[in-house]
Image (cartoon, rainbow, N blue to C red):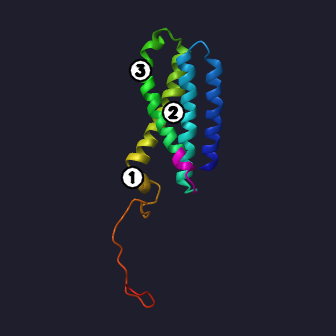
């Protein structure tokens, strides 16, 4: 999982800068291609840190920044796509937009929904149904065993 996520991050990094320098005439595609690659990098690296239980606040920072940029990019997409002269785009630009921008964003949205909204489903799919969430506050029964005084 670590190797796959790191390779995905490197490819997304390369593609982000390729978008930035290839589509100089189409500013919409240039910026959204660049931003979608950065979002994939941030969210997937945070997802990797979370899945492998690596310590530190960095996983929360990566996931939260990826989610913030995702919401920001969806709002920007909705409000700027109509004024981007989408009708005048070439067939190649449309294919690149759907394959390299929208498809990874749908994948990130599915993972975002699974991890953030349906945490129990994610934990059961990952085989971690026995993990107690950190926000769980409940009563634990103390057993009256030898050597353990009950106060």
**Tag 2 residue:** 104
Q: CA distance from mark 2 to mark 1?
A: 22 Å
| Secondary structure under the numbered disc 1 in the rendered image | helix
Tag 1 or tag 3, which sits nearer the N-term? 3
In this picture, is 65 found above or below 27?
Answer: below
Mark 1 and mark 2 in contact (Cβ < 8 Å)? no
At x 38% / y 46%, what residue is drawn? 117
Name the one closer to the observer, 146 or 113. Answer: 146
Q: Position of residue 69 (x, y in %)?
A: 49, 34
Tag 1 or tag 2, which sits nearer the N-term? 2
Q: CA distance from mark 3 to mark 1?
A: 33 Å
Find out whether residue 74 is within the magenta segment. Answer: no
Q: Position of residue 48 (x, y in %)?
A: 56, 49
Tag 2 or tag 3, which sits nearer the N-term? 3
Name the one closer to the observer, 84 or 57. Answer: 57
- The label nearer to you, 3 versus 2, is 3
Find out whether residue 58 is within the magenta segment. Answer: yes
| Secondary structure under the numbered disc 2 in the rendered image | helix
| Secondary structure under the numbered disc 3 in the rendered image | helix
**Tag 1 residue:** 121
**Tag 3 residue:** 79
- The region drawn magenta spans 55-61
Corner quadrant of residue 76: top left
Q: Residue furthest top?
A: 88
Q: Position of residue 86 (x, y in %)?
A: 47, 13
Corner quadrant of residue 17: top right
In this picture, is 124 found above or below 7?
Answer: below
Q: Residue furthest front?
A: 151
Q: Position of residue 46 (x, y in %)?
A: 54, 46
Q: Quadrant of the C terminus?
A: bottom left
């Amino acid at each position: 999982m670590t190797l796959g996520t790191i390779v995905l991050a490197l490819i997304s990094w390369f593609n982000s800068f390729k978008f930035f320098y290839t589509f100089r005439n189409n500013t919409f595609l240039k910026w959204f291609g660049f931003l979608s690659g950065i979002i994939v990098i941030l969210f997937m690296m945070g997802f990797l840190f979370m899945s492998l239980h690596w310590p530190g606040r960095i996983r929360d920072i990566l996931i939260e920044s990826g989610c913030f940029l995702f919401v920001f990019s969806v709002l920007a997409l909705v409000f700027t796509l109509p004024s981007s002269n989408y009708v005048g785009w070439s067939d190649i630009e449309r294919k690149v937009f759907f394959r390299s921008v929208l498809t990874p964003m749908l994948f990130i949205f599915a993972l975002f929904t699974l991890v953030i909204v349906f945490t129990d489903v994610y934990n059961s799919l990952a085989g971690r149904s026995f993990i107690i969430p950190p926000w769980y506050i409940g009563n634990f029964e103390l057993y009256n065993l030898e050597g353990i005084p009950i106060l």
